[in-house]
Image (spheres, grey):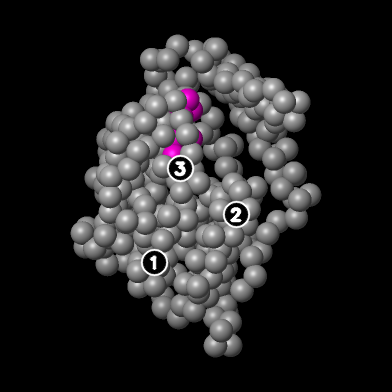
Amino acid sequence: MPLQKLSPLKVARQRLVNYAFWWSGALLKLRGHRFDVAAYCLVYTAFAVLNRFLPVLGLRRLNVHRFIVKQKTLWLVTKPDGLSFYLRPAQADIIYQSDYFEYNLRFFFDRIRSGTYIDVGAHIGKYAVLVGKNVGSKGRVIAIEPELENFSLLKRNVALNDLNNVLCLNVACFSENTQLKLYVSEESGYHSLVGHGLRTQNVSARTLDSLVQELDVDEIAAIKIDAENAEFEVLRGAQQSLALYRPVVLFESRTPIALEKCYRLLNRCQYEVRQLDPENYVATPFDSTGERIRGVGRPCRHHGSGSEPNIFDSQKGGQI
């Protein structure tokens, strides 16, 4: 089944909308008298736009976070939905946790109302906390974050929101159970098992299949994978779970080569892949006839069976 990608015009439009949302978010913070957060959002957005053009000119990207705040600063922020987070402005957590960042993914997570949600690359808990609140006693969240500082803040944010259904694991997900080096980036959202960084951390790597078996998971509603160019390796270690539980998969891919590898693997597992925004893709099983993903799954095209409504065609109705 062919990969369904957005047109270059739509990708460019979404990038512009992202910047516009960040600026409008800063203005809303001004109205709420959070002048520190507003100033940060405005400056960050200006630098983000500037950094789009610097590499074209052969210049190095600028890191605004180190210029405007102290490294050890922590802000406690309560979002409009009532969820609270400890954030590090020196690590751009203010931007990452904002509803204006990856705004078009919010409807995906809002529709997870039961079952198990697995967050690979949970960072400090933006989506793990949201889904944990949504599913309540009807489900649970497995939040996986390998980097130590992120993991520490992830646990604090889960506790801050009184969530007993969120399990935090300080491991990496990969294609085999082994020990790996995690390359630690200057920004907290860019640590990776592949590539390079300022320093390295030794981490324990597990396949998603082995974790699912060890934790006695009997149902998976959705999996999110944000592993900074290691998404294919995570998927390689999750093929048994994909075949058995048929979850919806949201994953990030930033290069054509990485995307092609993920797409081919998911297509072999009988998943359809669609692009949601410039960097995020959703994979839905097209052979499912079970109730687990009703309202989410794509038509069962390989057998010519009837179709099911798909929430990714619209932001209205349905839930996972």
Q: Is residue 272 visible?
A: yes
- Circle 3 packing at 10 Å, graded few (<14), some (14-19), many (20+), is some
**Dot 2: what SS?**
helix
Numbered circle sitting on residue 257? 2
Q: Quadrant of residue 139?
A: bottom left
Say which label, 2 or 1, has the lower sequence index. Answer: 1
**Dot 1: what SS?**
helix
Q: Is residue 83 left or right of residue 94?
A: left
Numbered circle sitting on residue 194? 3
Image location of residue 113, percent across then percent down: 40, 58
Say which label, 1 or 3, has the lower sequence index. Answer: 3
Q: Is residue 22 left or right of residue 170?
A: right
- Of 269 and 203, nearer the camera is 203
* Residue that label 1 marks: 239
Image location of residue 263, percent across then percent down: 56, 63
Q: Which residue is painted at 37% across and 62% down in the image?
A: 238
- Circle 2 packing at 10 Å, graded few (<14), some (14-19), many (20+), is few
Say which label, 3 or 2, has the lower sequence index. Answer: 3
Gap between marks 3 and 2 measured at Cα? 14 Å
Q: Is residue 107 left or right of residue 153?
A: right
Gap between marks 2 and 1 measured at Cα? 20 Å
- Of 146 and 310, nearer the camera is 146
Specify start and end residues of the magenta stretch as a single range: 185-192
Q: Is residue 121 magenta?
A: no
**Which amino acid, mark 1?**
Gln
Count the numbered circles shown.
3
